Amino acid sequence: MKREIPIFFSTDDNYIPYLDVAIRSLIANASKDHEYRIIVLNTGLNPNSISKIKLNEVPGFNIEFIDISSTLNTIKSKLKNVYHFSIVTYYRLFIASMFKQYEKVIYLDCDLVVLGDISKLYSIDLKDNILGAVPDQFVQRTNAFRAYATTALGVDPDVYVNAGVLLINLNEFRKCKIEEKFIHLISQYDFDLLDPDQAYLNYLCFGKIHLLPNGWNKEPLPLSCEGDKHLVHYALYKKPWQYDDVIDGEYFWFYAKLSPFYNEICQRKQSFSEAERIKKESTAIEILEHAARIVSSEETFSKKLCCAWR
């Protein structure tokens, strides 16, 4: 019997076209020696969009859409939309309690393309670590974000990971009560954050994260790739479906051209206005200024909690 590899995404209707590109790239490069269960967490999607995504199903790859609205009912008001992060980004924090049959899963953001065999990521031994993840390359190279990680969260910026690609040890996630601690913290405190769920995961899992080479989550920055380039993650504000000069953007367009959403993606790019571009670029500057404000604030993880919740 082939091993089943569970892979999670989360999305809303706006990101459906990019989800299709991500899934298409994943399937094209995955080893056929395994069975894959692709689970898309959501709180309601257009049925037509779901039908198009499910066109990707081939033998060995099953795609399911699971509405988690009821899971979020009691805490939805506490989940913040921050800059380009919608509440969709929090869904990964509830996988452990919702899918008790699994011991280990992969979580992927939608704004990426998989260039290598995803089963190799799943095969990495996490031992007693909660997460396997790649240090955030933008945080490492940006002074304002280095200070944010260090001062606001009490986390070494060189080990502050990007949460868009995660190998999750669900046994340890449950054992360390990460979900319960997260719910307590958002219920009791109102921390000012730049990267909501990512900040909580870095804080709560600190010291129990197995660091992966950046080839498993290569951000579009002018830096060398550690090992093979298995996965490109368009994590910064410049997305290839909006800008022409995105590093590694050609990988996105290779798979986008194979997608039933290709015309829609092209139309979105053509309609991306100069006003939207200016707004995005001013927001990028605002985020850096916001990071400095958080560093000087008294309402931070490190100042309020120290290491009490780790």
Image (tube, rainbow, N blue to C red):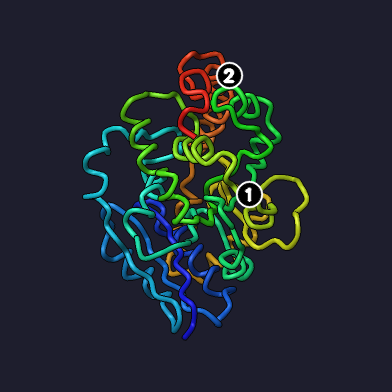
Residue 289 in picture, x, y percent from top left? 57, 20
Q: Going from the N terminus, do you reach mark 1 or mark 2 first?
A: 1
**Image spot of residue 243 (x, y percent):** 59, 47
Which secondary structure lies at badge 1? strand
Percent coordinates x, y for residue 105 in the rendering: 47, 61
- Is 300 placed above or below 15 here? above
How crowded is the residue under tag 1: few (<14 C-alpha within 10 Å), some, or many (20+)? many
Q: Is residue 124 above or below residue 147?
A: below
The residue carrying mark 2 is 292
Viewer-nearest residue: 240 or 77: 77
Distance of label 1 from label 2 (alpha carbons) = 24 Å
In the rendered view, tell whether residue 50 sits above or below residue 171. below
Proximity of marks 1 and 2: CB atoms separated by less than 8 Å? no
- Which label belongs to residue 18? none
- The residue at the point 45 percent across, 35 percent down is 196
Quarter of the figure with residue 78 = top left
* Amino acid type at image mark 2: Ala
Q: Position of residue 300 (x, y in %)?
A: 49, 21
Q: Which residue is mark 1?
A: 134
